[in-house]
Image (cartoon, rainbow, N blue to C red):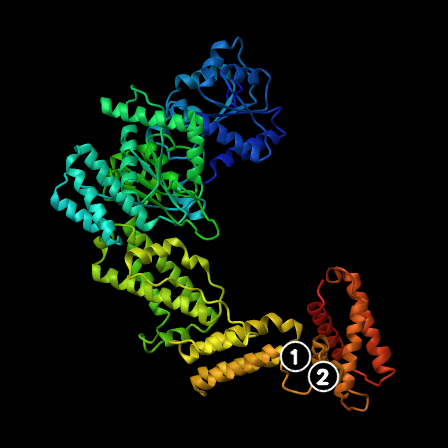
Amino acid sequence: MDIQGRRKGGVIWHTQGSGKSLTMVMLGRALALDQNISNPRIIIVTDRDDLDKQIRDTFKSCDLEPARATSGAHLLDLIRDKAPLVTTIINKFDTAAKNAAVVDEDANVFVLVDESHRSQTGRYGGHSQKEQKMRRLLPMDCYLGFTGTPLLKKEKNTLSTFGGLIHKYAIDEAVADGAVVPLLYEGRLVEQQVNGDVIDRWFDKISEGLTNSQKADLKRKFSRMDALSKTNQAIRAKAFDISEHFRQHWQDTGFKAQLVAPSKAAAVRFKEVLDEIGHVSSAIVISPPDDNEGNEEVDKDSKDIVRAFWAQMMKRYNSEAEYNRQIINAFKGAGEPEILIVVSKLLTGFDAPRNTVLYVCKPLREHNLLQAIARVNRLYEDGVTEKEFGFIVDYEGLLGELDAALTTYSAFEGFDAADLAGTVHDIREEIRKLPHLHDQLWDLFKPVKNKKDMEQFEQFLADDAVRQDFYSRLKAFSRCLHISLSSDKLLDVFEEDKVDNMKRDWKQFSELKRAVQIRYQETVDVREFEPKIQKLLDDHVVALPAEVIIEMVNINNADALKAVVEEVGVSEASKADRIASATRRVITEKMDEDPTFYRQFSELLEETIRDYRERRISERDYLNSVIDLASKVARKDRGRDIPEPVQNNEDGQAFFGILENALVKSDGEPVAPDDTARVALSLIEIIKEHHIVDVWSNETAQNKMRNAIDDFFFDVLRDEQGIDLPIEVLDDLEIRIMDLARARFPG
């Protein structure tokens, strides 16, 4: 504490998206439980209503129930009543301070201020009027500021006013820990003067992947650009680029985008153009019209377009709150809108994990820029698609030709370079990884002699470990190729021929993966067919016919086996591998139910496969042998006479398989097959007598069953039938009998 008895406060910087709100909750809980603090009280201060609600909900989800101040008078009542946990907007201190007859001098009040770099703290250097009113009301409070962005140099110089920097969790640390996704940056240039040559260049660029009728429609719409003003030309050109960029690379992936417009009127115009193009869905979230806003054009047309849009929204949603709620909830979900157009709202404190791409069409600086780009750094994974990067597409040249020293750009010049480390990465850094990942993929297949023979590739991937390595390398290459193709910087880094070669290889390896998944009877990984990858096929390589996923071969179905054998255009070795993989799967799944039978056929199957791989048999012999084995496994053909007592009794045959050749009389003579079969049936009766509900989770019941089997071997087999087994043999046999009982009689 200082000389006045006030606790020392300070500032906590935790990168946006890394759990800053949860840090506030944990700190609040720690203060509440600290035995050295008598009756601690906590006030959470934000500067916007939506953030106040968000913080309140975060505390509630952690079993802490805050009181939310609904007005300045209510805030004053909560302070007078010494409420233990309060959330409020800083503006409410204005009214509270005016009506306060007394001040609260409790030194055990902790004020946690979210996004404290903004106006409520006077940018750390000197107290703002709002903060002064807060401190007049709570002169002995301990002030703890939270921020999600680095501190400006001028802010750092005056941190001592509030107790200094308590803790820093920087951007590169959060990325390294996997708390947020890294951000890729791309600057894009849009022509401002539109003429015939520009239109032709744009048309060639954005019409890739469209049908002839779509191209004709697009050219008709694009030809109208010369009738528009320069401002509208710029908006229209950017809107076309954004529409095509999102359509080609992100549509139908489950990911969303934000477009930051320079003004409310521009936001409305952006939506009009996007709607006219018709490829992507969009919505706008802005505040009500205000003639005095500094960032809004003041010409009559702009005012009218914003007022007309707002009137339409209020007619549809009835209130601003409902308008915000419905559009934001829809954007956070899987459906429309795909692009959310904003101006200033939702650029801070807005979490939508699906939000992956940020199209920046507005000048931003310092904290505002950092706050905006952090909208797309949240983690997202839905079981099918996983977000690996956030993408910043900059139409304003905010960072120009990005390099390591971000502070050389005016947008970030107030920060220390070290604090900005890892903020964004030039997309060209990712593009330059392509050749290495491409080479890694090919390196796996060095042992394949004929690189044009796909049969050799498929045979090389017969080993499960090699196949999984292939899938991993292909996934890394696919991800990088998708990122690279989404950027217009790709051809700045590589020649077009090299890019075309990598795209062809991607197609070939993708087809190879699907082929071996079918050949070796794997469960198809739906992520390989996710829309993002399909978009790559649609827009950047020759389209493949619709893929029909062939169902697993059912070896119990003679028609299914026959269908595989009669497939056209598939090698006999590939057919054999598919049937062998299906047979191996059945053997693996059924092994516990009849280990003697299935182990025999497992060994025969592996021997057949090994003979083919070592070229001791032909493809035709390989196929015929595999078909024969599959048929015998399906029929449970044991290849020998079944003793009469267990004929037509699969349980009896399974236990007979364990006992066969294991039972020997005291004179050394093996027990006859029929007698062994009768022993198997006796064991089954003992097991059924002691089989109760949940027996396999009841150790006592299992011990009773095991003791009964033990008694049978000693009292009946040894004493009555003269079948005497060494203790070590008997112990092993009892373990196998219990394991088989568990497999055949579950429950």
Residue 169 shows up from this direction = no
Q: Which of marks 2 and 1 is nearer the N terminus?
A: 1
In front of the other: 712 or 532 = 532
Q: Nearer the viewer, residue 343 or 25?
A: 343
Q: Could you say where residue 681 lies in the image, as x and y percent from the top left?
A: 78, 77
Q: Quadrant of residue 661?
A: bottom right
Contact between marks 2 and 1 (CB within 8 A): the answer is yes
Numbered mark located on residue 505 in the image: none
Residue under numbered circle 1:
596
Left or right side of 664 for 547: left
Q: Residue 323 occupies which quadrant of the picture? A: top left
Q: Name the residue under label 2.
A: 660
- Write the residue at 80% across / 73% down: 685
Q: Distance between the residues labelled 2 and 1?
A: 10 Å
Q: Is residue 639 left or right of residue 304?
A: right
Label 2 SS: loop
Residue at the limit of the structure toward the top, as seen here? 101
Q: Can residue 275 be seen in this view?
A: yes
Q: In which quarter of the image is the C terminus?
A: bottom right
Instruction: Locate residue 628, reporting x and y percent.
Output: 54, 83
Local packing at callout 1 (Cα closer than 10 Å; few below 14, some 14-19, many 20+) is some
> Residue at 62% of width from left, 31% of height from top?
33
Q: Residue 505, relative to residue 95: is it above or below? A: below
Tell me where residue 644 appears, x and y as whole percent.
Answer: 74, 85
Amino acid type of the residue tagged 1 in the rendering: Thr
- State the image coordinates of residue 646 (x, y, percent, origin top left): 74, 81
| Label 2, residues with CA under 10 Å away: few <14, some 14-19, many ≥20 | some
The residue under label 2 is which amino acid type?
Glu
Asked whether 238 or 630 is in front, the reply is 630
SS at mark 1? helix
The mark tally for this picture is 2
